[in-house]
């Protein structure tokens, strides 16, 4: 819990500073880059978490990876968390920053599972309806395919799930028949 609070504090500070400097979208793109590289490079995360590797060496590594790819504010932030001995939390800080950015900009991640791929037209209709229903400015539709659904869709966001699949409807129908005594 303490690590989350610390990660939140650093992420919120970076978010506030990027808003103040009118660099929010730029810093967001930088944070996405840092997050992606950390997620895809477990060795880098291990180096950043290692107490055996000194901060100067960690900063040199980060400089080689990121210096010419990110804004000066973002790199200064990496330098700051290095000086504070918090590079071990870098992945967590980036995760929290991304979540807070989405809150500020009213962006929702919505998972949709269908039996077949969505057409562009259907994808756009889903986004439009979801934006209206959950009052957000942008919807990131995360698509997956599950042929066992037969048809329809399953929407998931936050703690909510809407299952409008044929598989679910057949299961409910079967359950109703069994409960009513019809065989």
Image (spheres, helix red, strand yellow):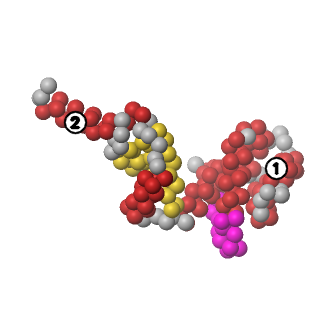
Question: Which dot marks residue 65?
Answer: 1
Q: Is residue 19 above or below residue 58?
A: below
Magenta span has 8?
A: no
**Magenta range:** 11-26
Q: Quadrant of residue 167?
A: top left
> Residue reaching furthest top?
183
User: Residue at horizontal 38%, vertical 44%?
Assistant: 153
Between residue 117 and residue 57, name the one nearer to us.
117
Magenta span has 22?
A: yes
| Magenta residues, dominant SS class | helix
SS class of the residue under badge 1? Answer: helix
Between residue 161 and residue 168, name the one nearer to us.
168
On screen, residue 155 versus residue 2, left or right, reads: left
User: Residue at horizontal 44%, vertical 40%?
Assistant: 116
Residue 44 x/y as whole percent: 77, 42
Residue 155 x/y as whole percent: 41, 48
Residue 46 visible at all: no
On screen, residue 118 versus residue 24, left or right, reads: left
Question: Which dot marks residue 173?
Answer: 2
In contact (CB < 8 Å): disc 2 and disc 1: no
Q: Earlier in the sequence, mark 2 or mark 1?
A: 1
Q: Is residue 54 above or below residue 103?
A: above
Residue 123 x/y as whole percent: 46, 53
């Amino acid at each position: 819990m303490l690590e989350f609070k610390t990660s939140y504090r650093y992420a919120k500070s970076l978010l506030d500073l990027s808003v103040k400097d009118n660099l929010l979208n730029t810093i967001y793109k930088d944070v996405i880059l840092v997050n992606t590289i950390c997620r895809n490079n477990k060795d880098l995360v291990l180096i950043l978490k290692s107490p055996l590797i000194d901060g100067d060496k960690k900063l040199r590594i980060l400089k080689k990876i990121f210096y010419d790819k990110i804004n000066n504010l973002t790199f200064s932030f990496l330098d700051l968390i290095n000086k504070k001995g918090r590079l071990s939390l870098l992945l967590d800080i980036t995760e929290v920053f991304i979540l807070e950015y989405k809150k500020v900009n009213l962006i929702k991640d919505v998972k949709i599972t269908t039996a077949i791929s969505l057409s562009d037209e259907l994808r756009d209709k889903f986004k439009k309806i979801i934006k209206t229903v959950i009052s957000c400015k942008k919807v990131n539709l995360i698509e997956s395919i599950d042929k066992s659904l037969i048809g329809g869709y399953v929407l998931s966001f936050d703690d909510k799930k809407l299952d409008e699949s044929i598989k679910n409807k057949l299961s409910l129908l079967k359950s109703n028949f069994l409960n009513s005594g019809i065989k």
